[in-house]
Image: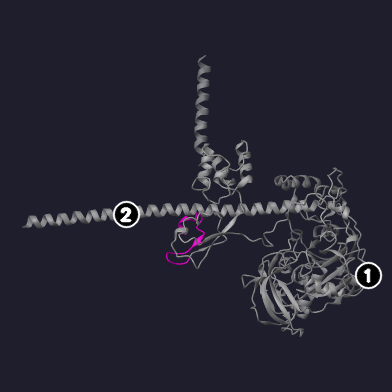
Amino acid sequence: MITAISLLSLLALLFGLLLGYASVRFKVEGDPVVDQIDAILPQQQCGKCGYPGCRPYAEAIAKGEAEINQCPPGGEVCILALADLLDCEPKPLSTEHGIEKQKMLAVIDESTCIGCTLCIQACPVDAILGAAKCMHTVIAEECTGCERCIAPCPVDCIKMVSIPLAVNTWKWPYPALPPTLQNPMEPVL
Amino acid sequence: MTLWPFHGGVKPDGHKSLSNQTPILQADIPPFLILPLLQHIGEPTEPIVKVGEKVLKGQIVAHCKQKKDCHLTMSAPIHASSSGTVVAIEHRAVPHPSGLTAPCIIIETDGKEEWIECLPMTNYAELAPDVVRKHIARAGIVGLGGAGFPAHIKLNSGAIDTLIINGAECEPYITCDDRIMRERPDEIIAGAKIVMHILGGAKHCLIAVENNKPEAYKALLEAADERVEVVQIPTKYPMGGERQLIQTLTGKEVGRSQIPASVGIVVHNVETARTVYRAVQLGTPLLSRLITITGGGVEKPQNFEVLLGTPMHVIIDQCRRKEGVERLIMGGGMMGFALPNDEMPIVKTTNCLILMRADEIETSRLLEMPCIRCGACTQVCPISLLPQQLYWHAKAKDFKKAQAYHIFDCIECNCCAYVCPSHIPLVSYYRYAKAEIHACQHKGKKAELAKKRHEFRTFRLQRDKAEKKARLKKLKTASNASKEATIKAAMERVKAK
């Protein structure tokens, strides 16, 4: 009887120590689920979801405060990936947060710009270059197309333009559907 | 010599006798030359001439962005292929499956063919391999078999044991390599020897010719000496594929993620070897290339030596175009792609133009029918992939699965689509899947960069805020201290009175 109790207590102590050690030794910084969600989000930092950036939105999803369909730049692909990760039903994109569209590029009309720096302060990825009372310009390579610079501009000199298709960005299309009776064969060439 | 067969492959009708009966002709100088800034695999070049500038034949008009050490970059300079005046630097349609435009230099030729001073390197054997390699890089030479890989990068491969000169020319319709092997075997062999010198210790040199080109084989045999071995190989498509050729000749398989140099082998096309010869012995850069104009759409199918940048219609007209041409294909009958018009220029990678009339196009092949799981594609795949599985996953847009089935090892040789009884354009599905995966990876990289920049910005804003706070606090304590000091001084003054 005594032996059994003491043995079990000893074991409990031993495992307790082991678990205590493991929790210190293998401590995971941050929330891994948030990281996984954040990796799926498109990182435009546009704030259209109602949160200040992709990371806060990811945290909100992880806490269950936000829906998975609030990211217009990510669109359907993003929603499907999130549904897959979180094991929940995919939903159509919530229209109150925006609609899915092609990625665009912000361009400053340099002759109209008055150098107010408001857009520089608004840009979440520091993609606008300039100083007070000097002309500003967008670094095209770094622009994520989030549109956060549009509203603050007092002279409306920032426009979103579509990125032209070039030989190196062109993609092979999905093979055309086989011709059917409803869709007769297109003439060759 | 022992040969090792590779898995799969097909034997399509060659259509070679259409164009290999007559000698190579020199094409006319066109009134305008269109030189795209990107004619090879790698980084595009930047123009170094201005509109209105006079250029001489052989003058460099565009080179790599770095301006120096171009021989280290994946780029090849572009030369003016005839003398004249630069009239524009603008976007023009280029021969690409997309039919899109790309930046080009347009030269109006003056017909005088005034050369820039040629700098041959006839004493190459006494020079260090690296010096000769730089010379090759300056000459703008790329792989002329059709892929356009910059030659100087391949020549910098380290320890090479065997050089293979690829004269297989397995693609249907193309015969320009066949003709050049018959007409200029000496130049090809001299070029091969130069390449061996650049590669340092290359011990063997094999020139492989398919056995459907007996005249070319004979001509090379006569011109060869003990340093080069001419080998006849079976006619089978895709024999001319780098990995297939290496396996046939040496029995060595180049792994999925390896390059041939990792097994001590470098492969060059016969025409590349000849261009190397001309660059070193005569000092002429890559200004022209051989091209086959063939198919039922022309009256006189013919091989030409064409100046790079010549618009396609100029050269097609020289072959007398027939009425009712339905399709223009650049490349061979198996891997070529259709072009929307013939206004585009001939570039370093244009080895063949096929003009097809309606009766030559198998319209039945345009009807895609359901896959019946017959497995014919698996039997012919030279890479031993599972084309059927790749097709299902690409069609269902399940790119992860497609990658698990090694879609990126596919060489797009079209053997699977050729034998498919349901006429499924299998390779089109693979190309689509590959493009989507690449685009996704690119997007991921961009997102990663945007995330980093956003994180740094957040950090910077917080840091600035903290610094400002600290500064204000310091100012406040300083002002407090000075206030106390003034009060104290005033008290002391009062006391003193």
Picture quadrant of residue B301: bottom right
Q: 10 Å neighbourhood of mark 1: few (<14), some, or many (≥20)?
A: some
Quadrant in which the N terminus of chain B appears:
bottom right
Quadrant in which the C terminus of chain B appears:
bottom left
Badge 2 marks a residue whose secondary structure is helix
Does residue B281 show up?
yes
Picture quadrant of residue A134: bottom left
Q: Chain of mark 2?
A: B
Give the number of the disc on residue B472.
2
The percent position of residue B271, horizontal first and vertical second, equals 81, 70
The percent position of residue A43, horizontal first and vertical second, equals 56, 50
Badge 1 marks a residue whose secondary structure is helix
Comparing labels 2 and 1, the label whose residue is closer to the camera: 2
The residue nearer to you, when weighing B132 against B356, is B356
Discs 2, 1: same chain: yes
Main SS type for the magenta part? loop
The percent position of residue B412, horizontal first and vertical second, equals 79, 55
The residue nearer to you, when weighing A178 against B159, is A178
The residue to which callout 1 is attached is B215
Residue B237 lies in the magenta stretch: no
Amino acid under disc 1: Glu
Q: Do labels 2 and 1 touch, CB within 8 Å?
A: no
Picture quadrant of residue B283: bottom right
Q: 10 Å neighbourhood of mark 2: few (<14), some, or many (≥20)?
A: few
Is B149 on the left-hand or right-hand side of B465? right
> Which residue corresponds to the image point at 77% horizontal and 84% vertical from the top-left?
B111
The percent position of residue B440, horizontal first and vertical second, equals 65, 51
Amino acid under disc 2: Leu
Farthest top residue in view: A1
Q: Which residues are magenta?
A: A120-135
- Among numbered discs 2 and 1, the one appearing first in the sequence: 1
